[in-house]
Image: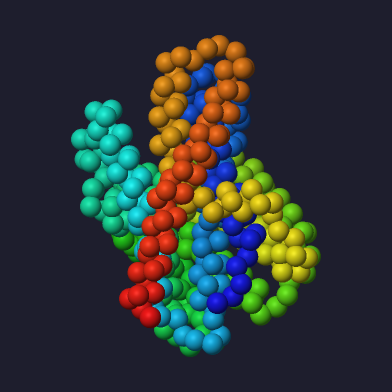
Amino acid sequence: MTSKLSNIQGLRAIAVLLVLAVHIQYNEARTDAEALLTPWLLHGVAGVDLFFVISGFVMVWITSSPDRSVNIAQFLFNRAARIYPAAWLWTTVAILGFAAAGTLGMWLEQSGLVFSYLLLPQENPPLLGVSWTLIHELYFYVVFAGLLLLPRRLLPLGLAGWGLLIVLAQLAGIARNGPWTSLVFHPLTFEFLGGAFLALAAQRWRIPHGLWIAAAGAIALLCGAIWLGLEREAEFYTWWGRVMAFGPGAVLLVLGLVSLEQENHWTMPGWMVWLGDISYTLYLSHLIVISTLARIWSRVVMDGPLDNLAFILVMSLAPVIVAHLAYRFFEKPVLAWSKQLGRHWFS
């Protein structure tokens, strides 16, 4: 297995902070007509695109052991153990919240309970709204596991063939014939593929000028947000338009920061790496925390910018505190237990 990269964790921190900014801005605007945060922060959804590129990179990176073959069953078990327990926890919390608010029946009419827990594609988002991204993640893992059956030298060809299949399905008009085909042929997969090819390149070559590459990535993300603007149609924003706007910048940002660590031995501050460690729990839980606090806040809202500043501060810190506690007392112990179980089963 190739050595762990601290900057990948730091990138996860950047990604989750971008998503966090989206929901803080959205909830501030809902509770106060004179919101301080700009609606341009809604483009923080690019954090999801960054997560996808990171996932593709990590899948290649952790399966690159030159001295032994990858156990496909163990790989899938590890990925499922990483995804499902925390997702189940926060899906359950969301359901309890809906029940307390008296809206559970309405939500169950829109989203299937079983499909939401199993993270399977359906017409509407799952009950834990942010877990729609996990459906893509699991699809990535399953297909990538199949590609691992190929000789390692053929992995780039397999990844390229995956991308070609998506393009052909789009051209043939069969990419949106239901939730399953929409998932299988979704252009967001190209962000995963971009990360995978980055890892292949980083393992083969030393890539210089990491700072300039990372800066180019940040600028590309900013340009993508400007290009999308604030009034693009949702269809454009969620399919090819989104990938074109945020995919290249996310790829460059990952490449630049990996290069900085490999070539210059520069890593992100420890607090960013720590935030990256809890980023999965923070991603799953933050919207529940923010929405709950915003509902309470709306009942005691006061006029003036100080109230807005207090809102922003509380909504920034509270999700991190909750995520830290959930990571320490749930996610981390469950991961440790699942690793022991995996070693027992697959040794």
- Give the number of marks: 0
Q: How is the image coloured?
A: rainbow
User: Where does the image place residue 333, in percent across and percent down from the top left?
Assistant: 41, 56
Q: Please name whichever residue, 151 or 227, is drawn nearer the observer in this view of the structure.
A: 151
State which quarter of the image contains the N terminus: bottom right
Of 32 and 6, nearer the camera is 6
Tell me where residue 29 appears, x and y as whole percent. Answer: 51, 25
**Which quadrant would residue 81 be assigned to in this image?**
bottom left
Residue 60 at x, y percent in the picture: 53, 73
Q: Residue at x 46, y 49 (%)?
A: 327
Up/down of 195 relative to 327, above or below: below
Q: Work out whether residue 228 or residue 126 is closer to the camera in this orientation and state it.
A: 126
Q: Residue at x 44, y 27 (%)?
A: 293
Q: Is residue 211 visible?
A: yes
Q: Quadrant of the C terminus?
A: bottom left
Q: Residue at x 43, y 45 (%)?
A: 326
Q: Position of residue 24 (x, y in %)?
A: 52, 33
- Quick check: can you spot residue 24? no
Using residue 201 as the reference point, say whether residue 342 is left or right of it: left
Residue at 60%, 68% in the rendered image: 4
Relative horizontal placement of residue 73, taking residue 163 as reference (left or right): left
Left or right of 194 in this view: 168:
left
Q: Residue furthest top?
A: 303
Name the one closer to the observer, 205 or 284.
284
